Every structure is written in structure tokens, then in C-alpha cells.
Image (cartoon, rainbow, N blue to C red):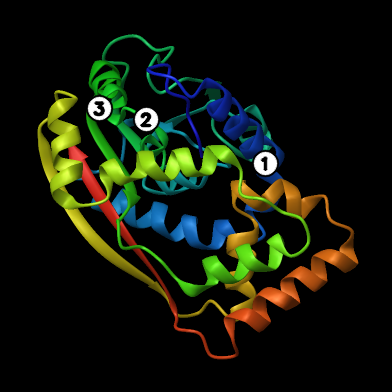
Amino acid sequence: MVVRSGAGGGGAALSSMKGAYSAGAAQWADGPGRVYGRLAELLVQFSPTPLAGASVLDLGSGTGLGSRAALAAGARVLAADLSIGMLLAGRDERPPAAVGDAVALPFREGAFDIVLAPFCMNHLPQPEVGVREVARVARILVASTYAADDDHPVKAAVETALSEIGWTRPAWYDTVKRSMAAWGTVPAATRVLEQGGMRPLRVERIEVGFPDLGVGQMVAWRMGLAQSGAFVAGLPPGLRSEAERRAVELLGPRPEPLVRRVIFLAAA
């Protein structure tokens, strides 16, 4: 789920990130979708305004998890993402979509009631610029990002297992991690909204547990993310199975349940 920022540098890294999301789109449903689908549903519930009957832009829509949650709530949805590969995933079962840049959206002023942005705008090097653009096209922003203390041992286990067979962390990933820090606490997220010219309505740190996810499913979640999805998809089946087995071994038979620590925010 990625949109580009036209503000500032980092063009090469951002272009690589866009390609990684497109190339890894097919991997999303195998792991990340189990986690991000639930988080999208909770974000819709967090909205201070019911989505039923509202015109909603699913910004940074990726494979459409936010769109599905908004449609289930009765919204009229248009999706936007810079990654064409993500928009094409499951295309026949999704609402209309447009390729769009978060800081230069191809829509008129006031085109939407609500912009729903699950884990999207935290990719921007200058997130307040994206907030300002959202304020141009919609009345309300409902968004999410990762809390600064969000972590789980499966992250290190998967990175280690993949590194042992040749994966390297892409340069854009560290750039994005730094961008995410701007939204990592309630005060920081509140400040970004205000800098972008929007009035915070609700900004909360929330913990979401996934007790039903087994060890293998946790590993599939991490392996299917953009920074590693394309690499994993290109592995011969035997080598992929070995990497999965190794990650499970590193994680151990009884890891702590997965809990995502996130910031949900709404602004007008």
C-alpha cells in the first residue's frame, strides 16, 4: 500500500518501493492480508462519521482491503494507489480505481466525503504535505500508521532466514521506516495533522491482537510484505519451504501472540 511523495528527494528509493509493491502484490493475500484486513475493518469502525452512503477515497488502497471494509460499511468507494500491480490484483471484484499520487491527487476539490488511508500516508517523507492534499479533496481523513513501539520477534526471524539465502534489505525500506517515525506516537501524529492544516478529531494508540495466527501464518505475514514479497515469490519451491522452515525454527515453537501496535487518527 504505497503512494509517492513528490516533495523532497528520495526519488530513486521511492521508485524502487513502487516496483516492490507491484511485484509483490500476489503475495499479499497469502499472509499480510490476514492482518491488514482486520486492521482496515477496525479503522472503518474508528471513523467519527459513519461510512454508509458516503463517498470514500481508499488512498494507497493496495490490494483493496480498505475498499472492502468501506464497501461492507455501505460506502461508495473509489480506490487510488501509485502501484498499478496492487490495483490490478483481484481487479474484477474491486471498485473503480485510479493511479494517484498522495501529494497531487487527480481529483477536484471536495470530491469525497472521507479519505480512508490505512497504512498509506506514513510512507510519505513529508506526511503533512499529504494531509494538506487530503484536506483539499475531502472533509474528513481517517488514517492509520504503526506505533513507534510496534515490534514482534517474527520480524527478526524472517529477515534472518531470508538473509541466509541471499535477501538484502532494500534501501527504500529504511527510508520508509524513518518516514513512519513521524506518525509513531499520539503527539507526533497530532502534530502532523495540525501542520497539514487539519483539525484532529481522534488520535489514539491501539493494540490489536491476532491470537488465532499460528507460527506459520506469522511467518507468511512477514514474508509477503513488500520488502521481501518479490524475493520470496522468485524462490524455487524447495528453497522457499526451507526459508519458511528456518524462520519457524528461529521463532521457536511457542512465540508470543502477534499484537500490532498502531496509531488510528481522524481529522477534519
Q: Are marks 3 and 2 in contact (CB under 8 Å)?
A: no
Identify residue for label 2: 125
Amino acid type for the residue under numbered disc 3: Glu
Horizontally, is 227 left or right of 57 in the view? right
* Label 2: element kind: loop
Amino acid type for the residue under numbered disc 1: Gly
Seen from the viewer's position, the closer of residues 47 and 26 is 26
Identify residue for label 1: 90
How far from the left and from the top, in percent, is residue 13? 55, 29
* Residue 132 vertical placement versus 71 (above, below): above
Could you give the CA–CA distance between mark 1 and mark 3, rounded to whole angstroms? Answer: 31 Å
How far from the left and from the top, in percent, is residue 92? 68, 35
Depth-wise, is mark 1 or mark 3 nearer the camera?
A: 3
* Label 3: element kind: helix
How far from the left and from the top, in percent, is residue 145? 34, 48
State which tag comes first along the sequence, 1 or 3. 1
Horizontally, is 35 left or right of 149 in the view? right
Q: Residue at x 14, y 41 (%)?
A: 190
Seen from the viewer's position, the closer of residues 50 and 60 is 60
Amino acid type for the residue under numbered disc 2: Pro
How would you rate the neighbour count of disc 1 (Cα within 10 Å): few for under 14, some for 14-19, many for 20 or more? few
* Residue 56 vertical placement versus 234 (above, below): above
